[in-house]
Image (tube, coloured by chain):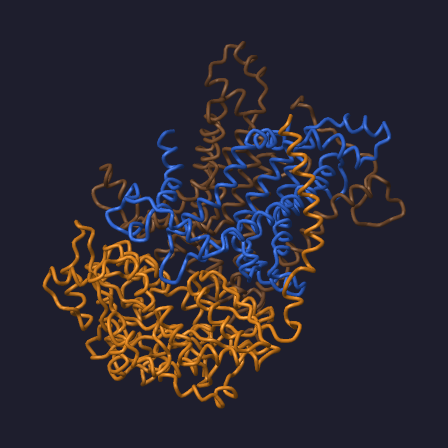
Amino acid sequence: MGFRSWISVALQLTMATALLVGCSQPAATPDSAASSGANGVTLKMVESITSPQRTALLKEMLAQFEAKNPGIKVDLISPPFEGADQKITQMLMAKEELDVLEVREFNAKQFSMNGFIENLKPYTDKWQNYDQLTDVAKRRATWVDKTPYYIPNGLYQRVLYYRTDWFNEAGIEVPKTWDELLVAAKKLTDPAKNRYGYSFRGGATGWDYAMITMWAYNGTEVDPDSAFFMKDGRTIFSTPQSLEAMQYYKQLYKEASPKDSVSWGFQEMVQGFVAGSTAMLIQDPDVIDGAKEKMQEGTWATAPIPIGPSGVAQQVVGGPGWGMTSYSKHKEEAWKLIEFLSEPEQSTHFAKKTSTIPVVKSAAEDEFYKTGYFQPFIEMSQQPTKFLDVSRPVDYKGWGAWQSTADKDIQSFLLDQFTAEDLLKKWDQYWTKEKAERK
Amino acid sequence: MTLFLAFAIFPLYWIIITSLKGQKEIFSLPIQYWPEQVTWINYLGIFQISHFQVYIWNSFLVSLVASAMVVFIAMLGGYVLARFSFKGKRQVMFGFLVTQMIPMFIGMAPLYMMMSKMHILNSLFSLMLIYTVMLIPFCTVIMSGFFQRIPNALEEAAMMDGCSRLSALFRVIVPIMLPGIAATFIFAFVQCWNELIMAVLFIDEESVKTIPVAMNAFIKKYDIEWGAMSAATVLSVIPTMLLFAFCQKYLVEGLTQGAVKG
Amino acid sequence: MDTQKPIVTMTKQVVPEGKKSFRISKEGRFIFLCLLPAILFVSVFTYYPLVRGIIMSFQNYTLFDLMNIQFIGLDNFVIVLTSPDFPRVAMNSFYWVFFSLVFQLLFGFMLALLMRKKFRGRGIYQAFIFFPWAMSGFLIGLIWRWMFNAQFGVINDLLLKTGLIEAPISFLADGAWAMAAVIIANIWYGVAFFAIMILAALQSIPEELYEAAAMDGAGRIQQFWRVTLPYIMPTMLVTILLRVIWILNFPDIIYAMTNGAPAGSTHIFATYMIDKVIFGQDYGQASAVGVIIVLILMLFTIFYVKATKVEKGGDF
């Protein structure tokens, strides 16, 4: 009985709160009052590649910005990484109040085409630090229509991570080409010991790794501005080199990678490497951070990504950055914030802390990047004819539909439900049609 | 049955163990079934790096208010559905059933726009509102099941004594129905406590984030912070488990009344 | 309380709902006012967005070109229905619902029978059994994905240690295994709901019925078939219907565990729809899949209600 009356009291209480909160909440929501602070401006800003640590770092930097600009306050929105871009898109579609946003290389085109983000040209023209950006960073900034739509905050360039101790044990050198990589990976594979040569990516967006291999096999004949096509206009999928590349790709999976890895995503391939199950991994620089935390010093190192038979290696260097919404009511202030975050000193600090490659030239002289795990990145950027930066055809209408089936196609191919010829033929037809329809 | 128990409990064991391991140990091979060194660092971390106390409070508030609103609305609706037969009743019932068939994603973009126009995004209120809506159909029908078990004579007697129907409902019926109400409340509470997708979409700021949103933040680009994630899971499950253990008698009694119809 | 007593309903004045006429009786107004909040909330925040979603399914609503949205008739439906993925997604959806349901029901039933008896620590025990319910589906998917990993997952390690298998099984790399894996995770998640509902039904069975059956000379097993099962049938039928609807519409676990991999062999309608939004960026096609889901479930429900005669006075 005591319990029963307890419940009844609790119920009455909760209903009272319901009424109270239900009524008082709308007045208490910050966004209605926030946009015009008492004597200044409140900017809304959203980040995309979030993590608790990155958010904390960004908040520190924003506090500095606010201290320097007394009239401006910044509200940072940090949705969980998983689904962040989805949410940002949703906010833009609803024209939800937002001033500064983190744009990714893969959604920049959509955002600009739908008129969500502002052309920053008028601002960058007057900005002295624009020329401080490295070439790759500038290319990322002007990714869409050769116009600056956002200022990158760090570059995600891939390198080869490898287990130095296993390599020493087996007495082999770090591979410099894809062929060498396969030889080394096979040598290091020993399923009995749960050891495999390579951390394969077959899961979400694994198609990007297939593309990297195909590009390396096709070499400089690939059109860097739209790298699903060759310079002569054919699709990349129509060349004999691509067929070779895909056969190689399957061999790498079958002979030197865990069987499981056909469904591995980003997290698993990294986990496989740091847990000591795979000997090699091709990944972004932010993995350095996690590997440092979880692996013994001296058991691993980094190297430039392998080149193909053509003598070059291409990849799409990821470069998220700060952009501005086209409907922002405080564009001057928003630019001030972007400018502040993109100052060489600030952006280098941000890149270091988030374990990415800085976007400014001066960083190449930084001790932090000249030595140790980051050294291969500098090495690669000093050989721009060997390590090329290319673009995906995200400006095609069929991009989304292709992307949503590409992983499935590759997985079918890896699991022998599809031949390499069939796969390439399918993609060749798809992109030939896309190109024809676009004209 | 033992096998099934092992199957049911092992993931829980695994989460707890992981929450007590250090970063290196979580990923080390061979797999450790007992932490070599028990550490509380993950628990400390979720209070220091993220503001877990804030999220717990937010989740608590949202779940409490939404469940209370649901229970209240479902009680009224359920009562009417149980006691009267009227034209349109079948349609109302079918309308409720169809809500359960709608995939969440289909109306999500339009819903976001609506909330945006109403200027209630990024507030706990938006979540309370939407959770209430999501739970009304199921809870109303469950409630109507409870009312059907209670003989009509009770409130008729009260009405003879001069009570209005509404006051008869609250004075006579509700006290008898407390187990059922508690069961519905707990069901609603747990659903709100777990909800992730709407919460991610509607909530922007740290100060109004709920536990599931905060937990998703441990999934980073290249890594899932299993230590912090497990610790957060353990902490977030404790309140609901306590609620279960404490009220299980009522929960089962309550559902008994609602679920079985003669 | 006499559980077998038929429901008393008061059919005094029948008033069409919402139609305001001066002849509205006191009762009619009461009915209307009591249902109003529920109906209002549901129509505004569930049905209005649904209608908008349905409209989208007839438009070329892609993120690629939001400036140029037009009605394109049934194109989205044609694309979805004629896609080579469709038969497979439909089959997977069936397996997903069927096996999840059967095992959830079976285990839930066993659990409920077990817990009907009072024993020490039953409350704690129940709380442990029910705890999956207290987690978000997405998180459950992630945990199982981690545990099922062939290289560093704990399930393979356990199976190897106990000698049940010789070499690790790549659960998530093989279509059939992957489907089994996601279903196992879903069973783990869903047993609690069945257990709780069935337990509730079991506890409402009057002891006298068993006594009467025992007097007729019915053994334990006969008692089960003659008393237990018929008595709890209505609960079971309602619970099963609800679970079918919920399971088919439950993408969280598969989305987190495999997202359809490998090679699309674990996609169900609900995850296929998410895929269309997130990777395909095509809200039109995604909505078309959503509409198809609703239609399938409506047909199923009508068929189910007819076949089982579960409908009583408009209840579901």
Which percent across, then down, holds residue A260? Answer: 28, 54
In the image, B185 versus A256, the foreground residue is B185
> Closer to the camera, A275 or A82?
A275
Name the residue rendered at 80%, 35% in the picture.
B167
Rendered residue at 76%/26% (across/down): B154
Counting from the top left corner in percent of width and height, residue C69 is at: 58, 72
Q: Colour of chain B?
A: blue
Front residue of this view, candidates A370 and C180: A370
Q: Residue furthest right?
A: C22
Quarter of the image for residue A362 reads bottom left
Left or right for A220, reference C25 = left
Q: The chain coloured orange carries which letter?
A: A
Q: Is residue A134 left or right of residue A150?
A: left
Q: Quadrant of the C terminus of chain A?
A: bottom left
- Vertical arrangement, residue B246 with respect to residue A199, above or below: above
Q: Position of residue A361 (x, y in %)?
A: 34, 83
Q: Any idea which chain is the brown one in this picture? A: C
User: Split into 4 quadrants, where in the image is the N terminus of chain A?
Assistant: top right
Query: Is residue C88 something that shows in the picture?
Result: no
Q: Which residue occupies the extreme left position in the image?
A: A171
Q: Is residue A174 above or below residue C301?
A: below
Pick the front one: A332 or A393: A332
State left or right for residue B32 relative to residue B6: left
Quadrant hosting residue C232: top right
Report whether residue A280 is seen. Answer: yes
Q: What residue is at 41 percent from the left and 53 percent from the top?
A: B45
Left or right, C214 with respect to A179, comes to right
Residue A11 percent location from the top left of the image: 67, 38
Tally of numbered tags? 0
